[in-house]
Image (tube, coloured by chain):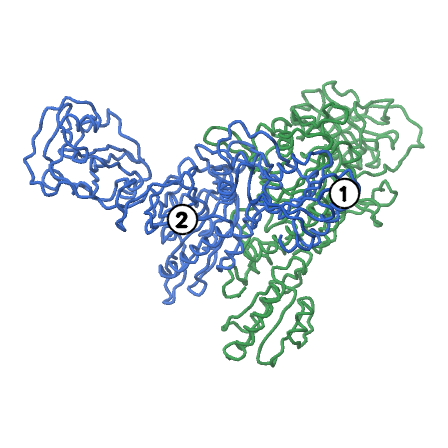
Chain colours: A green, B blue
Amino acid sequence: MRYSKLFGKTIREAPRDAVLTSHKLLYQAGFIRESTAGRYFLLPLGLRVQQKIQKIIKEEMDKAGAQEMIAPILHPVELWKETNRTNSVGFELMSIKDRNKMEFVLGGTAEEMLVDLVRKFQITYKDLPFNLYQFSTKFRDEIRARGGLLRLREFVMKDAYSFHETEDDFKTEYQNMWNTYVAIFKHLGLSTIVVESDNGYIGGEYCHEFVVENEIGESKYLATKDGSYSAHVDVAQFIRDKKNLDEPESTMVEVKAVRGNTMEDGAKLHKKPLWQQIKDVMLVDEKGNMILAVVRGDLEVNEVKLAHAVGAYYFRHATVEEIRAIGSEPGFISPIGMSKKVKIVGDPSLRTIKNAYTGANKKHRDLLNVNIDRDYSLDIEADIALAKQGCLSTTNLPLIEKKGVEVGNIFQLGFHYSKKMHDAEFMGKDGTKKPYYMGCYGIGLARTLATVVETHHDERGIVWPNTIAPYQVHLVGLDLKDEAIKEQAETVYKQLRENNIEVLFDEREEASPGTKFAEADLIGIPHRLVVSRKTNGKIEYKPRISKEMQLLSLEEVLNIV
Amino acid sequence: MRYSKLFGKTIREAPRDAVLTSHKLLYQAGFIRESTAGRYFLLPLGLRVQQKIQKIIKEEMDKAGAQEMIAPILHPVELWKETNRTNSVGFELMSIKDRNKMEFVLGGTAEEMLVDLVRKFQITYKDLPFNLYQFSTKFRDEIRARGGLLRLREFVMKDAYSFHETEDDFKTEYQNMWNTYVAIFKHLGLSTIVVESDNGYIGGEYCHEFVVENEIGESKYLATKDGSYSAHVDVAQFIRDKKNLDEPESTMVEVKAVRGNTMEDGAKLHKKPLWQQIKDVMLVDEKGNMILAVVRGDLEVNEVKLAHAVGAYYFRHATVEEIRAIGSEPGFISPIGMSKKVKIVGDPSLRTIKNAYTGANKKHRDLLNVNIDRDYSLDIEADIALAKQGCLSTTNLPLIEKKGVEVGNIFQLGFHYSKKMHDAEFMGKDGTKKPYYMGCYGIGLARTLATVVETHHDERGIVWPNTIAPYQVHLVGLDLKDEAIKEQAETVYKQLRENNIEVLFDEREEASPGTKFAEADLIGIPHRLVVSRKTNGKIEYKPRISKEMQLLSLEEVLNIV
């Protein structure tokens, strides 16, 4: 490709609102342009990189035995109603009606569509297992898009769906996909950590994120130093450290407590540690049910864990009026004497303390020496506390808080879809129909691309890994007004292409050497070649990552690149 | 690929509603499944073919100097308002609002998006020309989808947009794309005819369809036997044959005419030929303007031509009430004495007759001996008549009516978009800004795939051209319960793959030879190989298109495939 002909050249300034390095560099180097927030044009350079990422993913997926196909983007809304996801996904879903008033969802993920496809066939145990994948445009009506390609509202995703006769067979495929993802990200030059995470509206019982550790990431996770445990904050488990369990249980008393409504106000008034207090959070789920989440005072409620514990989709905090209407008082809520209308969900951390203090469901009244089982009981006891830095992992090491970019994920779906959707069955060996066991597996291409830039750049620009660079060689011609030099540069260009090497050839006569080198560094192609008067019939070679130059013959160059 | 693992096997019955051969065969052979009307899943076999078509198109487009990029599918509706296409495209456009109430169009074509991209750059005459193309999913809310892939509501299109400094430069690219399309369709095994056609809501002044002649096609066109002229019926021109021009003009008279409302009723009553009658069609455009289209009695009004002549988007017939409200009468309409509120548009065919007869704008009253210019005049005189079989082409040969499938099209856009959209300009050599001159070029991939099936099949199934067959070789193993034969078949499978040959390997033990051969014929892979007891260590080779079999060694097979 001749640089003078390339659509999307480099530009000096980054977009005014650009914060992320990948946003700035991809824009400046001519890889992307924004259409609307979260929706981007990939310019020729950007699309070349995305296509190479796609090719690597395809090769590894095919090697793993998955089969590529493609589903429509417009999903009939009836399918999403079959699994109740029109409710659980919420606002991220975009829907549209056609001229016949038939309603469709713009696909953001395709579990229902794939089940709908598979149930069109009379499948038997002999057809199982199979893993179908596609590269297709996905839509998510995100509240906030981030600059550049990190969080988009429209993007190409590789999504795969596997169908199995048994859970054991699924587990083999889950490991197969796990290994495939490790291989894919390695080819892409990304070092990933596999993190347990929440399945959110995808459903199922467990899943893992592939995360690239980076400060700009939106995935918060906790990991031990030795890597024996790593999990997203939403799901991270931890050992509750025992506090004053040796203390004998004292008699519960109600006392006057003229104080503010915060946990700190309580600790200050009673001159006791925060961990001895009981934290009571009154929430309302999407159906209007009131839930009192109770954890030890030094911990926080994890709403994701809570949602799983009570089978809800999401919560809001109860209003002052709602709290008073059930006979309690904001700032003085307590599980003791709580209305039967409220479901009390408590964390095991409540069992690590004795003689706790809490409100008395009345303004300016507190209870002291409160003990679980003796003074109050829980409707549900479950892990609902948020793990944080310093907590002890289940492998007995302190957890360290980290941030990273989620570039891929793998989900166990189990029977989540096949039991909700009719006819999602196969004929078993015994002649009876059974639901299939499923998994799904996603990689966002554009986010992966942006993450490579976040992890592969220097102060001068992008440093593409060889595997996905838009071109292998950036050939810079200098002194091109000299016909002999021009001819030499053109010959090198021709010979490289004849050797099937992808070359970007900067053959502009007017640009200065400084400009050309700066642009080459910004674009980030791995191998830079220069032909000029100074190179004297040879070719100057410099890798993007190094400052050392060598004068080589064409043959020597071909051996390197 | 092992056939036993392939997702999407052959099936005996075609869908009940299937009419088209391509629909039946692609369904039965396991290439496609319908999601909703006009929206299909491409199964692994189907996607492989579409990807090969895409690859061929990409190679030819790249060779022609075009650059691939990709635009978002959701287009901000403001762009379509800038060019007034929210009105001109009508119901085919689907639109959607996001959670912030921002409105988007689901892209059906991307002229505005590409202009919006290009105007983000400060381009100068040095950057021109360029041609940007993409493969992206397109949406059209068609009134009727046809079965299978011939007319879809969602499909992948290759759409290209070229930008030029001058019309001359554009014309070079138009020819370049024309030649590129000829090459593409040749590679795909399609013989195309290039037909002048209407630009519809795309805009611009002229365009050409690439049509594969076929009875099932929806493109009606007229062509001369020698190919010197071919044009879509919407735009086909023809020479108006002269009728009774030698006749002296008689005096116009109004007569009593108790007759029905049809043309034939008039001819019968006055005992004169149909061609001597004047045909008056009262239409109302999308803005409510009344238009009287007048043609010679043996011709029809061509509404597409009429729309261009008056600058309207579409018409409906005027109601009885509307016709009476302007002082006329259905069945007795005449240009003579027509209300000034009505725009009279007449065809040159009116100048080929003398002493015509027509209504008198009153019930049961006709006018005889009517002559143009003397008795009535036209507000607009333009070619508004429909060409038909037997008419004389502008190359002086009779036109023949044909049908075909439109697989591609190329459009001159001129300044249609760059003048309507702000800042759609480049800096000229003289330092002033000017709008660029544009063209656009589309190919629908799925329709092309279906057209290949329509033109490449026999009574047993599909006959894929080598270039786009899902696999090159269909290897059938027989007698596989015999371990030695099984090992031989497996070896052949392995060796073919080691030689980079794409093989579909039917290694099922239970299926009968007859079933396997029938399925192979249905799927339509070009080369069939059989390993069985009978082949005696060799390989039986049969091309899909022939009945002759040969016993060959592996080396000989490799030489052929």
Q: Give the residue type that dot 1 points to.
A: Lys
Q: Position of residue A447 (x, y in %)?
A: 64, 49
x, y percent for residue A6: 52, 62
Disc 2 secondary structure class: strand
Q: How many marks?
A: 2
Residue A112 in picture, x, y percent from top left: 63, 32
The circle drawn on residue B486 is 1
Residue bearing mark 2: B193
Q: Chain of mark 1?
A: B
The quadrant in which the N terminus of chain B is found is: top right
Q: Would you identify the image quadrant in which residue B143 lies? A: top left
Horizontally, is A437 left or right of A30 in the view? right
Is A221 placed above or below A249 here? below
Amino acid bearing label 2: Ile
Residue B237 lies, with reference to residue A252, above or below; the image says: below
Q: Chain of mark 2?
A: B
**Residue at x 86%, y 23% (from the top left corner):** A373
Mark 2 closeness class: few <14, some 14–19, many ≥20 residues within 10 Å: some
Asked whether A533 or A269 is in front, the reply is: A533
- Give how far apart the Cα atoms at labels 1 and 2 are: 49 Å
Look at discs 1 and 2 and give the one toward the viewer: 1
Say whether residue B153 is left or right of residue A20: left
Discs 1 and 2 share one subunit? yes
